[in-house]
Image (tube, coloured by chain):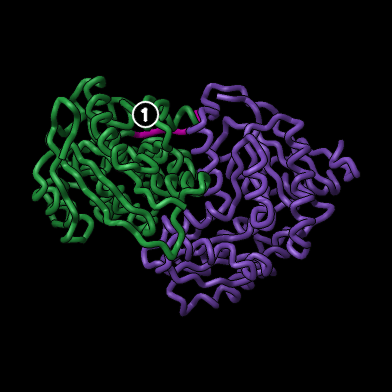
Chain colours: A green, B purple
Amino acid sequence: MSKQAIGFIDSGIGGITVVREALRQLPNETVYYVGDTARMPYGPRPTEEVIKFTWEMVNFLLTKDIKMLVIACNTATAAALPELRAKLDIPVIGVIAPGVRGALRSTKNKRIGVIATEGTVKSRAYADALEAKDKSVVVEQLACPEFVQIVEANQYNTAHTTHVVEEKLQYFADKNIDTLVLGCTHFPLLDVAIAAAMGPEVKLVNSGAVAIENVSGVLDEAGLSNVAPVERQLDEYYTTGSASVFKMMAGHWLDNEDLNVRHLNITSDGLVL
Amino acid sequence: MSKQAIGFIDSGIGGITVVREALRQLPNETVYYVGDTARMPYGPRPTEEVIKFTWEMVNFLLTKDIKMLVIACNTATAAALPELRAKLDIPVIGVIAPGVRGALRSTKNKRIGVIATEGTVKSRAYADALEAKDKSVVVEQLACPEFVQIVEANQYNTAHTTHVVEEKLQYFADKNIDTLVLGCTHFPLLDVAIAAAMGPEVKLVNSGAVAIENVSGVLDEAGLSNVAPVERQLDEYYTTGSASVFKMMAGHWLDNEDLNVRHLNITSDGLVL
């Protein structure tokens, strides 16, 4: 057992869906989150820069004595996970490998769809990892950048959104997939519309949800899980952008109006309060 | 990457459903399995004896240079996991904690059913672990020893079985659970009948399937996963009972008539070919 918090990092606010899973699956654990909203999106940036920004978030969280790190961002996972895992003494979990494992657990017919941002689709991070684990798998990828815009604009519950999602996912109509990976942390907010569009035969895999199940396992195996009755510490959220906008958006997603959000300054010494 | 096999141990043949998940989710990995069929069931035995028998299986597999150990047996997991994990240099995964984590990932209404053997239900292994991770969870346990008999008698596909399963699971009719943990390695062979009895609103969690997803994660994090194209080694199955009966039963479950099964003798020096 360890009352230290679990650290989460993301280029912005998408990783909040991963936090939502942590609050749901691991209610005894405390969450510290850093979103680099001021410099999002990471997708178009050079890998070296993504790694540098990621280290700035990590270094800030290390000053707060976290027991584990979750990279709640596909781009940062792809760019920085191996280096972080090699250099840090705490366990590090990304979102890509858990999504891959969840999809392989789910599929029966070995035909798997992946929806993600343009960058993740182009990188083939999910497709290559799926095929490396099982070369008989057929992967159908589709970039859905519109879905990110819809979520960022807080439009995930409208009739128009249902229509846009349904039309976009028509792509899979003749692909005979039985599993669809939500390969972007924004997409779980559209899960109802996505499930309706795909029909009951297709299982959705929320990479962040599997990542948290994975976090739970790593904590168990290391003897670091908090067990009831434990007194939770206050969760802490940090953003390099506007604290009030972050508080409104993340609070809406987490159904919590009282999020404890603070602004971080980007300086040549890293991120500071 | 490591071509060493993953070792599986069980008191008998039930763990073959966990192997089935390994073959499905991790087709690049080689399986070595020991079933202590001659001394099954472990349920009624004193804990010290279960630990002793478990070590005999483990010591045999260690001579075969396994890279990881899966305790594919609820009783042996409950009795021996902490000691094995403390004393072995390789990762050790049981079936209980993964089932718990899978259930917490699945449930939305926090009402979870668990079906298992009498011994597992009485031990409250699942119930206590679920409540330790989330004290707001309500757990409804039901012992279903008949289901083990049905499976052992190879009757899992008959109309009579469907009827027995349906009648037994009526217990959950007024419990409002949204997730049911299959807390015995025999039960995944009845999943069609169980799913039909529970209806589409209840998600089934196969502890063995989650355990293999967990194995996949541990191998990934340790850099021990085999990636395609890799040449798989021949799987090896060992039983302390009749090799021909084991080959017939396990072959049926795995849909493979050519299983490589050998008998192990129980001696004062441990298990030997």
Place of residue A90 in the rendered image (x, y in percent of width and height, measured from the top left): 42, 37
- Above or below residue B161? Residue B52 is above
Residue drawn at x 49%, y 32% is B220
Left or right for A158, reference B246:
left
Task: Please report the residue visible at 59 percent of the width from the left and 67 percent of the height from the top.
Answer: B124
Subunit of label 1: A
Mark 1: which secondary structure?
helix
Q: Residue at x 33, y 53 (%)?
A: A30
Residue range in magenta is A134-140
As for residue A75 lying within the magenta part, the answer is: no
Is residue A136 rendered magenta in the image?
Answer: yes
Q: Where, quadrant-wise, is the N terminus of chain B in this rendering?
A: top right
Where residue A252 appears, as percent x and y from the top left, is 17, 57
Q: Decide: few, some or many residues near mark 1? Use Cα within 10 Å; few <14, some 14-19, many ≥20.
A: many
Q: Does A46 sit above or below residue B151?
A: above
Quick check: B237 left or right of A112?
right
**Does residue B172 lie above or below A186 as drawn?**
below
Q: Looking at the image, which is closer to me, B27 or B109?
A: B109
Q: x, y (%) of residue B188?
A: 60, 56
Query: On the rendered structure, is A196 left or right of B101?
Result: left
* Residue position for label 1: A84
Q: Please tell me in which quadrant of the rendered image residue B235 appears.
A: top right
The reply, left or right, for residue A273 in relation to residue A218 is left
Which amino acid type corresponds to the residue marked 1 in the rendered image? Leu
The answer to which quarter of the image holds residue B182 is bottom right
Q: Residue B143 location in percent, x, y?
A: 63, 71
Residue A115 visible from this viewpoint = no
